[in-house]
């Protein structure tokens, strides 16, 4: 996850945003694919649109690209209203999941193509193509055809093709989806590196929350055609605004609960806990991250305001992490996670345990 | 394991296949028969009939006419048909279905009706140039084939390639010319080969609208078969069959290369 | 669809322009001539005035009635024989593994792409008085039969031409039938013949119907085969159009006859589009 030192967002140009979406929505007949959304992407930012399939993230990206027109609302890129502007005139770049390299052209010709469209002289084309191939660390593939390269190499060529004509904005539609796990992690680093070196604004679409947390300055979490939460990875992880957000990002334990007073909530099994964050009224859930919780055997253990009692069902050890599964008196399951170490306490199946957490580790979610 | 019924079906099927191939198989030996009579089976072998084709007046000239007409037809039908297929497969505009049906409608009209229509029409508008008369008729007859073949090829193209080119700044024409066309090259060639073959063999429209200076090979053959059946026809038939086979194999080879 | 943005609408219109050359050509070289034919069919034969005369003359013309009946007879015979030959062939092909089937299809495609003149000429050789068949019969000591310039010759020639057209829709139907149906029936105890009669054949009827309609549409327009392989009494409607147009120089009659042929073909085409898979035969690429 990105370092959260300066609130996650890098110091950026504040004159105007690179992308501004103003109440942009899309309907197909009677189906509302995207509900009205406002979004500002700052210059030089790496913003990810994250969500499950059907959340509308690709529709939103296509509207920034101009491949789909919005049913309502305006799209602004770099200070210009481009809602009526065709994609070819928006001056942006796009990277696709299946690379979209022209199979009948060599790598050189593929990268040169946008420059030829812009009538750049041949000598200048040669210079820029060579330079950009060095930037993506593929200096020797110019004469080959796309099918001769591996998936990762093709995606880097695709990136090179994007940056060679200096667009002000690069859109990426699940570019790492077709690559295997190891390659994906390498490419995540590669894309971050390019972003930092070149400073181009990037809007990235993915359904992989780890990827989003790794790469983004800010994430817009989307669900069912609407924006769920727009925040830095840190905020999204520690302060999700809804049950959907809490469950989509990382793992979480949720217990139905009700606010009983300022900063106090009663869990469904009767225990009262202190709530420091989140919504302040009504019915909902208390959410705690697994690594924030601790297990201690009963009897004993502090009877702190933030503890519940339950029964240990199972313990799973996977590599370096240990997961404990505890059920409350009323049947809800909590997942507690700790790092494996030699001195950890061993619990028995069916043992009565106390689960506790720091006061500000729990959030009350009312939706 | 093959049952008696399976063997029976196999025998019947192969008999039917032989029946289908019979005409093609019969003309070839006669063509190489060393005689000016149509005898089957031939007694001796030689190329006298082929030599007659080249020396008898009219046959070679008619072949040249057919080649010229077929080339012009193919060029014209590709130039109008491929972009039309592009519009039909990539466009979303009202009336698209109706347009598709319209462009494919010549298949449903009996050839003699098109022939008559053109015959009267050309007389009405005063179009007397033989080549133009025949070529335009052939283009109408072959347009559906080219549109269907090109559309099939367009369906195989990865849409992301066109999206990528558009986002990179390519105008619609640049996209069509430098990305789409190269990608459907084999469909265009296949469509062109079929159009050439159909035009080269076309007889009904040509019979109605040809003028004295544009006697195509099929027209000459047609009158020859009707009025004086000459053995040279066997040689011509052999060559035409060879043309059909070559084009069929070429298209099959193209399709196999595509599927690779 | 009603909520497309101005941007999308402009793009759509731009693409539609790519079909303009073909559309203009079709309007000028297909629609206009057809319009003239329709116009001619509604013209009186002596003056340039509107008249249904041509149609009434056709309805009462004994020549038309005779030839119409001939056309119908020949069409039905040729269609029947084409079906009889095409079905077993399609059945056999459907059972082959795909690679072998593709190879055998080339053998079906060669006659499909061979010129009708070549095929007709070959049949004059095969069916003639001293042709292939009669020579063989004579060699066996049997009497010769007249197979050419009569009904028999025309039907043989037409059936031969039509078989590939009949094979395609039936084959495509048979190949699409799930293998499990025959297998399940066999496990239930059904023999090959019963499986064919109760499962394969009924399921193949749409393909058969499509083939029959397609072949009938084609038969309406047959010109070359009856002209070359038939006798005076085997003239078909297409030959009659030629007669009216260029021998009798009666354009209204020729046009009226053409209009009738077009109408018949159109009706058959509409019927064809109602059969599943039928419109695909006409080259429709809408899926």
Image (cartoon, rainbow, N blue to C red):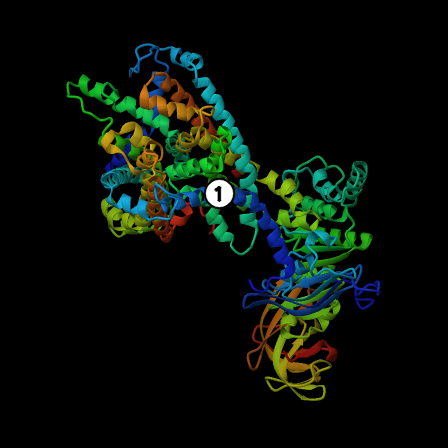
Residue C55, visible in the rendered structure: yes
Q: Position of residue A67 (x, y in %)?
A: 64, 56
Q: In front: C244, or B253?
A: C244
Q: In front: B132, or B105?
A: B132
Q: Check the image and report above or below for B77 versus A69.
A: above
- Write the residue at 33% across / 12% down: B36
Q: Check the image and report above or below for A38 versus A87.
A: below
Residue under pointer 1 = B148
Q: Position of residue B246 (x, y in %)?
A: 46, 26
Residue B156, visible in the rendered structure: no
Q: In front: A309, or C93?
A: C93
In terms of secondary structure, where does tag 1 sit?
helix
**Residue C87 image-quadrant placement:** top left
Image side of residue A309 versus residue C86, left or right: right
Q: Report the residue that reaches farthest toward the bottom.
A: A261
**Residue C217 image-quadrant placement:** top left
């Amino acid at each position: 996850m990105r370092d959260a030192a300066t609130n996650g967002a890098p110091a950026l140009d504040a004159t105007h945003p690179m992308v501004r979406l103003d109440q942009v929505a899309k309907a197909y007949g009677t189906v509302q694919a995207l509900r009205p959304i406002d979004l500002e992407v700052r210059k030089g930012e790496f913003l990810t649109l994250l969500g499950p399939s059907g959340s509308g993230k690709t529709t939103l990206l296509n509207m920034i690209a101009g491949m789909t027109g919005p049913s309502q609302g305006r799209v602004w890129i770099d200070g210009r209203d481009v809602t009526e502007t065709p994609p070819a005139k928006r001056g942006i770049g796009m990277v696709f999941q299946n690379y979209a390299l022209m199979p009948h052209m060599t790598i050189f010709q593929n990268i040169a193509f946008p420059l030829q469209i812009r009538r750049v002289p041949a000598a200048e084309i040669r210079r820029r193509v060579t330079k950009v191939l060095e930037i993506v660390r593929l200096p020797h593939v110019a004469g080959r055809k796309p099918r001769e390269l591996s998936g990762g190499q093709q995606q880097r060529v695709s990136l090179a093709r994007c940056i060679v004509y200096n667009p002000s904005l690069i859109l990426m539609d699940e570019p790492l989806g077709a690559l295997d796990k190891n390659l994906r992690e390498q490419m995540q680093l590669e894309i971050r590196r390019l972003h930092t070196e070149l400073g181009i604004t990037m809007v990235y679409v993915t359904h992989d929350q780890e990827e989003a947390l790794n790469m983004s300055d800010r994430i817009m979490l989307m669900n069912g055609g609407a924006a769920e939460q727009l925040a830095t990875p840190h905020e999204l992880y520690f302060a999700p605004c809804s049950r959907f957000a809490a469950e989509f990002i990382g793992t979480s334990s949720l217990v139905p609960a009700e606010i009983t007073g300022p900063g106090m909530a009663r869990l469904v099994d009767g225990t009262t806990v202190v709530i420091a964050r989140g919504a302040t009224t009504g019915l909902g859930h208390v959410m705690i991250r697994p690594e924030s919780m601790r297990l201690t055997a009963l009897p004993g253990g502090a009877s702190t305001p933030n503890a519940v009692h339950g029964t240990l069902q199972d313990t799973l050890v996977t590599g370096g992490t240990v997961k404990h599964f505890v059920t409350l008196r009323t049947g809800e399951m909590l997942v507690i996670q700790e790092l494996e170490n030699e001195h950890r306490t061993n619990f028995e199946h069916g043992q009565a345990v106390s689960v506790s957490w720091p006061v500000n580790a729990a959030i009350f979610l009312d939706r | 394991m093959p049952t008696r019924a399976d063997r029976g079906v196999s025998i019947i099927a192969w008999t039917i296949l032989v029946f289908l191939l019979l005409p093609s198989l019969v003309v070839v030996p006669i063509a190489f028969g060393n005689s000016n009579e149509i005898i089957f089976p031939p007694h001796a072998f030689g190329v006298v009939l082929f030599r007659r084709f080249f020396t008898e007046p009219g046959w070679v000239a008619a072949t040249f006419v057919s080649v010229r007409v077929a080339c012009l037809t193919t060029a014209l039908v590709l130039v109008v048909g491929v972009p039309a297929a592009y519009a039909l497969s990539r466009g979303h505009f009202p009336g698209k279905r109706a347009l598709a049906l319209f462009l494919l409608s010549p298949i449903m009209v009996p050839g003699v009706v098109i022939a008559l229509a053109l015959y009267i029409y050309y007389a009405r508008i005063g179009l007397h140039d033989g080549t133009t008369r025949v070529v335009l008729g052939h283009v109408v007859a072959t347009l559906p084939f080219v549109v269907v073949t090109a559309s099939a090829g367009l369906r195989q193209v990865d849409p992301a390639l066109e999206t990528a080119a558009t986002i990179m700044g390519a105008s619609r024409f640049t996209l069509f010319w430098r990305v789409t066309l190269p990608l459907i090259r084999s469909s265009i060639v296949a469509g062109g080969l079929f159009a050439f073959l159909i035009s080269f063999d076309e007889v009904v429209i040509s019979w109605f609208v040809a003028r004295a200076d544009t006697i195509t090979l099929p027209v000459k053959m047609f009158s020859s078969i009707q009025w004086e059946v000459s053995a040279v026809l066997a040689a011509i038939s052999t060559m035409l069959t060879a043309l059909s086979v070559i084009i069929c194999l070429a298209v099959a080879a193209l399709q196999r290369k595509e599927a690779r | 669809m009603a909520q497309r943005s101005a941007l999308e609408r402009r793009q759509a219109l731009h693409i539609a322009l790519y079909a303009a050359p073909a559309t203009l050509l079709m309007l000028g070289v297909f629609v206009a001539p057809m319009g003239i034919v329709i116009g001619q069919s509604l013209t009186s034969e002596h003056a340039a005035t509107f008249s249904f005369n041509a149609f009434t003359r056709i309805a009462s013309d004994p020549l038309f009635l005779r030839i119409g009946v001939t056309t119908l007879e020949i069409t039905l015979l040729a269609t029947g024989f084409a079906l009889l030959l095409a079905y077993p062939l399609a059945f056999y092909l459907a059972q082959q593994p795909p690679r072998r089937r593709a190879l055998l299809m080339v053998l079906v495609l060669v006659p499909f792409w061979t010129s009708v003149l070549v095929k007709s000429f070959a049949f004059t050789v095969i069916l003639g008085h001293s042709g292939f068949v009669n020579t063989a019969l004579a060699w066996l000591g049997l009497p010769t039969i007249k197979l050419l310039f009569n009904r028999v010759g025309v039907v043989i020639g037409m059936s031969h031409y039509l078989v590939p057209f009949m094979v395609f829709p039936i084959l495509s139907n048979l190949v699409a039938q799930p293998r499990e149906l025959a297998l399940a029936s066999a496990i239930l105890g059904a023999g090959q013949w019963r499986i064919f009669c109760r499962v394969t054949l009924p399921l193949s009827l749409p393909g058969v119907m499509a083939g029959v309609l397609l072949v009938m549409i084609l038969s309406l327009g047959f010109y070359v085969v009856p002209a070359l392989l038939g006798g005076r009494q085997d003239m078909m409607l297409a030959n009659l159009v030629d007669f009216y147009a260029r021998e009798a120089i009666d354009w209204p009659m020729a046009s009226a006859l053409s209009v009738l042929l077009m109408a018949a073909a159109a009706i058959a085409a509409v019927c064809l589009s109602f059969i599943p898979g039928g419109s695909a035969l006409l080259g429709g690429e809408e899926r």
